[in-house]
């Protein structure tokens, strides 16, 4: 019923700082693993992380195209994360039929 397996997922994220970009990418790991396995997840534990790409994009904004220039920076990362997953296979659990004969009053 309970099983442990290892899988590798690729996720991407972005933000206005390096930490936000990594946090955005890592927050997607659970959703991707859930979509791949279709099982009830108990624990997802990162085992390894590899950076596939990391980019910094900078552009200068100006108020009314002329005044108050400021530089806006956006970081993006693509990661390959290897995770150890502990899950329950709900398909292997035998559910018994129960009748509800009591009336609620």
Image (cartoon, rainbow, N blue to C red):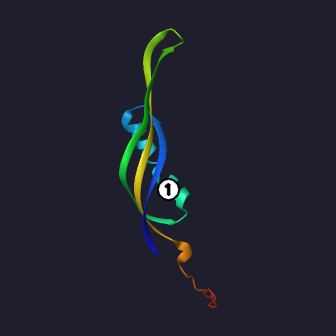
Instruction: Please name the residue that numbered disc 1 is placed on.
Output: 33
Measuring from the top left, give residue 97's x and y in whole percent: 61, 86
Where residue 104 sits, quadrant-wise, is bottom right
Measuring from the top left, give residue 18's x and y in whole percent: 38, 34
Where residue 42 sits, quadrant-wise, is bottom left
Measuring from the top left, give residue 86's x and y in whole percent: 42, 65
Furthest toward the top, the residue is: 66
Q: At 52% from the left edge and 58% from the top edge, which residue is drawn?
A: 34
Q: Where is 96 relative to 25, above or below?
A: below
Q: Is residue 105 visible?
A: no
Q: Where is 48 relative to 14, above or below?
A: below
Measuring from the top left, give residue 24's x and y in whole percent: 45, 42
**Quick check: 37 left or right of 45?**
right
Q: At 41% from the left edge and 52% from the top edge, which residue is drawn?
A: 82
Q: Is residue 67 visible?
A: yes
Q: Where is 104 relative to 10, above or below?
A: below
């Amino acid at each position: 019923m309970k099983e442990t397996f290892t899988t590798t997922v690729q996720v991407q994220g972005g933000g206005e700082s390096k930490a936000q970009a990594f946090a955005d990418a890592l927050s997607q790991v659970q959703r991707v693993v859930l979509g791949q396995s279709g099982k009830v997840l108990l624990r997802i534990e990162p085992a390894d992380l590899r950076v596939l790409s990391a980019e910094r994009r900078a552009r200068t904004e100006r108020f009314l195209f002329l005044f108050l220039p400021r530089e806006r920076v956006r970081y993006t990362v693509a990661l390959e994360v290897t995770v150890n997953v502990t899950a329950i296979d709900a398909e292997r659990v035998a559910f018994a039929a129960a009748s509800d004969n009591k009336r609620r009053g």
